[in-house]
Image: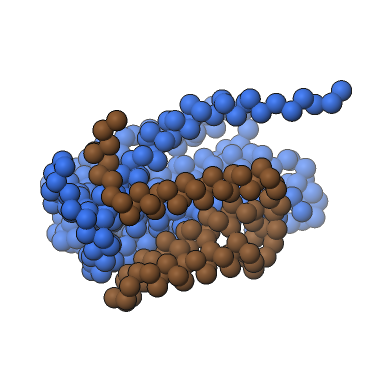
């Protein structure tokens, strides 16, 4: 029997279309409208053309925040991805109480709200009442994340590693569990070393989940706001002020809506570009595996 | 319906109208002649829609780069962008 051509299912996407339009497309269009105007208040707007975009693109503080953001995101990836792989390789396999306990422990940091993570580390790092700060002081290191840029950076970075490495580990663990035992048996028969098993069996089989992990961690870290805001407030100076925080300062702190809208669009385009690059890599990797 | 809160201006309205017309045109084109994934100058296989997206994203960065690098009229960036989009759609 021939298939009946019926396109009525397209109507089922109308609710999604409306929700996306209401929550994303219309607000984005409004931001574009704001970005070419000076906004003094409701109904008090003046067209300024591309003035805000020029101001944003020539803003040294924004350049600094962008460089800081890229360095931060790359550092996050450089630490969390290898560490996540190592943790996943060390996790017990199979169905046992040990496996369940490990999975629960790893999932715990992921369940903590972002602002709570910031507060935990704010207290943890304090020299007078925090375990980390007090320990550093006890061994003679003058650790203070509130007035030392390097210490603030390290604390923000370690906090992110503590919060999110579990995600990478869990994804890698899922990838490792999907490898059939026959691969390991063949490697054993061939007398393959641990490194060879990792390099030629485990790593290629984890490629799919690793790309997802890289994408998620890069995008998340690129848009980080709450944790550094709670921990350091962007300081000392501007040393831990990332793009989101600078944008918030501009929009909410200075009420510079037009400039903040232009900044938002530039930020959005950068995120869109990176997303597209990662999406393309993921798609191409999938094509490679099929061949 | 009161649309004052969206703070519309004529240039942004024209901009979004162009985007909407472009999407509508692409939809009609797709219905009339469905796209086939092809490999051109870009490093991956792309559909017609992919190439339009790459063209538009590239155009946005051409405009931003122009604003950052020169004080010349932005129409120059628009002309470069049109050439870029045409090249990507035809040869990408």
Q: Residue at x 77, y 53 (%)?
A: A291
Q: How is the image coloured?
A: by chain
* Chain B, hue in figure: brown
In percent of width and height, residue B62 lies at 42, 68
In this picture, is B86 found above or below B8? below
> Viewed as shown, does residue B9 lie left or right of A146?
right
In percent of width and height, residue A87 lies at 51, 46
Q: Nearer the viewer, residue A237 or A269?
A: A269
In this picture, is A166 found above or below A16? below
Query: From where the camera sits, is residue B15 visible?
Result: yes
Q: Nearer the viewer, residue B11 or A200?
A: B11
In this picture, is A16 found above or below A285? above
> Viewed as shown, does residue A217 lie left or right of A284?
left
Q: Residue at x 48, y 30 (%)?
A: A16
> Viewed as shown, does residue A287 lie left or right of B87?
right
In percent of width and height, residue A15 lies at 48, 26
Q: Residue furthest top?
A: A1
In percent of width and height, residue A32 lies at 32, 50
Quarter of the rendering occupied by the N terminus of chain A? top right
> Viewed as shown, does residue B10 lie left or right of B41?
left
Query: From where the camera sits, is residue A277 visible?
Result: no
Which chain is the one coloured blue? A
Q: Residue at x 47, y 59 (%)?
A: B57
Q: Residue at x 33, y 54 (%)?
A: B11
Q: Nearer the viewer, residue A215 or A146?
A: A215
Q: How many marks do you count on the picture?
A: 0
């Amino acid at each position: 029997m021939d298939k009946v051509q019926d396109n009525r299912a397209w109507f089922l996407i109308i609710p999604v279309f409306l929700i996306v339009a209401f929550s994303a497309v219309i607000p984005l269009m409004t931001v574009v409208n704001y970005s070419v105007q000076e906004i003094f208040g409701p109904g008090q707007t003046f067209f300024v053309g591309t003035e805000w975009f020029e101001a944003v693109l020539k803003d040294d503080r924004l350049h600094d925040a962008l460089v800081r953001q890229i360095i931060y995101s790359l550092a996050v990836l450089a630490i969390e991805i290898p560490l996540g792989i190592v943790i996943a390789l060390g996790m017990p396999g199979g169905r046992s109480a040990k496996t369940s306990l490990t999975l629960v422990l790893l999932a715990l940091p992921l369940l903590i709200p972002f602002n709570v993570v910031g507060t935990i580390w704010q207290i943890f790092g304090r020299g007078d009442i925090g375990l980390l700060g007090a320990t550093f002081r006890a061994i003679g290191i003058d650790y203070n994340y509130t007035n030392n840029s390097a210490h603030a950076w390290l604390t923000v970075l370690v906090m992110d590693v503590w919060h999110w490495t579990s995600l990478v580990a869990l994804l890698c663990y899922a990838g490792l569990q999907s490898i059939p035992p026959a691969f390991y048996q063949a490697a054993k028969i061939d007398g393959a070393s641990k490194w060879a098993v990792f390099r030629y069996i485990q790593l290629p089989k984890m490629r799919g989940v690793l790309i997802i992990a890289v994408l998620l961690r890069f995008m998340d870290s690129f848009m980080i706001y709450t944790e550094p805001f709670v921990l350091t407030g962007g300081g000392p100076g501007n040393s831990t002020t990332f793009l989101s925080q600078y944008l918030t300062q501009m929009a909410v702190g200075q009420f510079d809506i037009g400039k903040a809208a232009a900044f938002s669009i530039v930020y959005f385009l950068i995120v869109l570009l990176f997303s597209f690059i990662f999406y393309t890599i993921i798609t191409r990797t999938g094509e490679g595996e099929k061949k | 319906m009161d649309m004052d809160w969206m703070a519309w201006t004529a240039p942004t309205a024209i901009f979004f109208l162009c985007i909407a017309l472009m999407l509508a045109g692409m939809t009609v084109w797709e219905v009339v002649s469905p796209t086939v994934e092809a490999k051109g100058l870009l490093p991956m296989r792309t559909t017609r829609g992919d190439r339009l997206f790459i063209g538009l994203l590239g155009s946005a960065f051409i405009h931003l780069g122009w604003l950052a690098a020169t004080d010349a009229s932005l129409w120059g960036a628009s002309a470069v962008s049109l050439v870029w989009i045409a090249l990507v759609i035809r040869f990408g």
